């Protein structure tokens, strides 16, 4: 037991059916449905291998989301093939989550075999119970179809999905109510690392927040500024565009349309308040960049054209951010500065990632897209700690107990009764 949570050392799994929730949610090419990175799949290998080596019948549950929040859903079939390559052993896949086909496939597993079920978010309950919408208790989550159907088939639940530990959903928090439960090896390692970090980050501590998945970011900014975890926040990506728009700075109608399309208008008010309350701590871009016919164009804020869709922070901003990174002792980064996949709008993310790589500070980078960007700009080996969790890491940094941690602790306490 560590941190009040059972680990794999506490259970004999040989011959047992183990439901193991992993987070192999990867950046995806939305048109082709192909994976743009495989880091998280690699991350769960130690746990899956250990369970399989010890003779468990391993049933993997996972989700695959979209780049922008919850609008697109993809099968986990390609993930099974990648995991199988990493493990150098077969990983079965069934295109069902908890229906008769999935249950049949589970019942046919032999000791040591591994089965990946399809995307758990194909189930409406997995999404509609998302904490922002419904907020069911963990006990209520244990009454969902997924948990009620699969728990009776299993002996143990293992959660290795640290990257999704901030999500309050049945596949993550429901099984702990009914089954003995443990964290997997990746969860254990990441939880341990980020806990150490939080104890006393060296000062000054800079946060760099960007990307397109910004709900978690807006849930934590106020907290980390108020409790002093962050000494300053540099903004990029959609976070910056929302901040600029909220403070009446010109960002262009294309940027505003994207904010509306992605449902992020709801953050404008909070963004305005944050900028008003922390004018010296929240740093906004000085310039922005767009793309015209495949060419990059940088605009000072005073020159932003009416129809701009900002796809990157501008060059001056990137240089200013690189300078800020040189002056601090700890940096947390979550989310790229722009659309780094396109060459002409990659400069902001590249400059910031290279500055992190060159920095003497303790540098922490979290989240799927950020990891992909680090790889693209060859900085992976130059970062102090890379966390598979983006949203989970930033929510952890607010000091709140993550829902999955709470569920696992409750299961451990119940086991001790
Ligand atoms: C993440 O990428 O942050 C986790 O996999 C959770 O995914 P979600 O943001 O789609 O819930």
Image: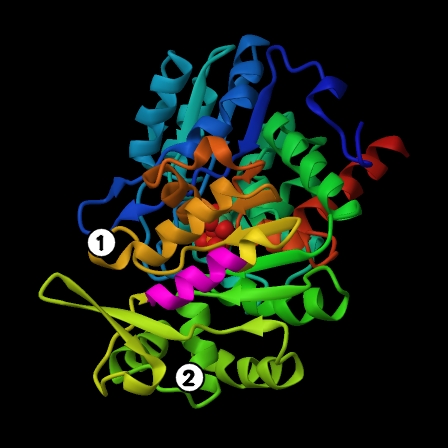
- The colour scheme is rainbow
Which badge, 1 or 2, is on the more N-terminal residue?
2
Vertical order, 170 against 70 (above or below): above
Vertical order, 160 against 286 (above or below): above
- Kindly identify which numbered label has been placed on residue 35: none
Would you say 333 lies left or right of 308 here? Answer: right
Would you say 200 lies left or right of 383 here? Answer: right
Kindly tell me whether residue 364 is visible in this rendering.
yes
Nearest the eye: 95 or 225: 225
Dividing the picture into quadrants, the one containing residue 36 is: top left
x and y percent of residue 84 in the render? 36, 19
Q: Does residue 290 show up magenta in the picture? A: no
Nearest the eye: 366 or 173: 366
Nearest the eye: 361 or 393: 361
- For the C terminus, the image quarter is top right
Task: Give the residue furthest to the bottom.
Answer: 248
The span shown in magenta is 313-323
Task: Give the residue furthest to the left.
Answer: 293
Vertical order, 371 against 17 (above or below): below
| Residue drawn at the location 49% of the way across and 27% of the way down | 59
- Badge 2 marks a residue whose secondary structure is helix
Secondary structure of the magenta portion, mostly?
helix
Disc 2 crowd rating (10 Å Cα; few below 14, some 14-19, many 20+) is some
- Badge 1 marks a residue whose secondary structure is loop
x and y percent of residue 263 in the render? 40, 75
| Residue drawn at the location 70% of the way across and 59% of the way down | 398
- Kindly identify which numbered label has been placed on residue 245: 2
x and y percent of residue 124 in the render? 43, 57
Kindly tell me whether residue 142 is visible in this rendering.
no
Q: To which residue does mark 1 refer?
A: 342
x and y percent of residue 213 in the render? 44, 61
């Amino acid at each position: 037991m560590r941190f009040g949570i059972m680990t794999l050392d506490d259970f004999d799994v040989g011959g047992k059916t183990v439901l193991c929730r992993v987070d192999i949610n990867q950046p995806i090419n939305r048109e082709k449905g192909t994976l743009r990175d495989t880091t998280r799949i690699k991350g769960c290998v130690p746990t899956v291998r250990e369970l399989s080596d010890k003779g468990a019948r391993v049933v993997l549950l996972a989700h695959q989301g979209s780049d922008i929040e919850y609008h697109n859903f993809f099968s986990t079939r390609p993930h099974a093939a990648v995991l199988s390559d990493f493990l150098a052993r077969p990983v079965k896949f069934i295109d069902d989550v908890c229906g008769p086909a999935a249950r049949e496939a589970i019942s046919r597993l032999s000791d040591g075999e591994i089965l990946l079920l399809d995307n758990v978010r194909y189930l409406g309950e997995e999404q509609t119970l998302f904490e922002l919408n419904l907020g069911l208790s963990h006990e209520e989550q244990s009454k969902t179809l997924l948990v009620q159907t699969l728990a009776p088939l299993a002996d143990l639940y293992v959660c290795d999905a640290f990257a999704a530990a901030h999500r309050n959903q049945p596949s993550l928090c429901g099984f702990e109510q009914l089954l003995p439960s443990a964290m997997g090896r990746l969860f254990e390692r990441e939880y341990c690392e980020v806990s150490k970090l939080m104890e006393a980050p060296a000062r000054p501590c800079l946060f760099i927040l960007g990307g397109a998945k910004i709900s978690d970011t807006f849930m934590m900014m106020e907290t980390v500024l108020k409790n002093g975890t962050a000494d300053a926040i540099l903004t990029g990506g959609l976070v910056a565009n929302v901040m600029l728009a909220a403070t009446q700075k010109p960002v262009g109608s294309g940027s505003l349309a994207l904010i509306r399309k992605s449902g992020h208008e709801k953050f404008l008010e909070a963004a305005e308040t944050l900028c008003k309350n922390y004018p010296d701590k929240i740093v906004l871009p000085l310039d922005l960049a767009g793309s015209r016919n495949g060419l990059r164009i940088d605009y000072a804020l005073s020159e932003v054209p009416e129809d701009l869709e900002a796809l990157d922070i501008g060059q001056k901003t990137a240089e200013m951010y690189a300078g800020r990174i040189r002056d601090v002792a700890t940096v947390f980064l979550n989310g790229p500065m722009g659309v780094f996949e396109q060459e002409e709008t990659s400069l902001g993310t590249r400059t910031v990632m290279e500055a992190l790589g060159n920095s003497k500070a303790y540098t922490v980078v979290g989240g799927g897209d950020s990891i992909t960007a680090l790889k693209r700009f060859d900085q992976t080996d130059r970062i102090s700690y890379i966390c598979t969790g983006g949203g989970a890491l930033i929510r952890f940094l607010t000091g709140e107990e993550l829902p999955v941690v709470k569920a696992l602790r409750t299961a451990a306490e119940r086991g001790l009764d």
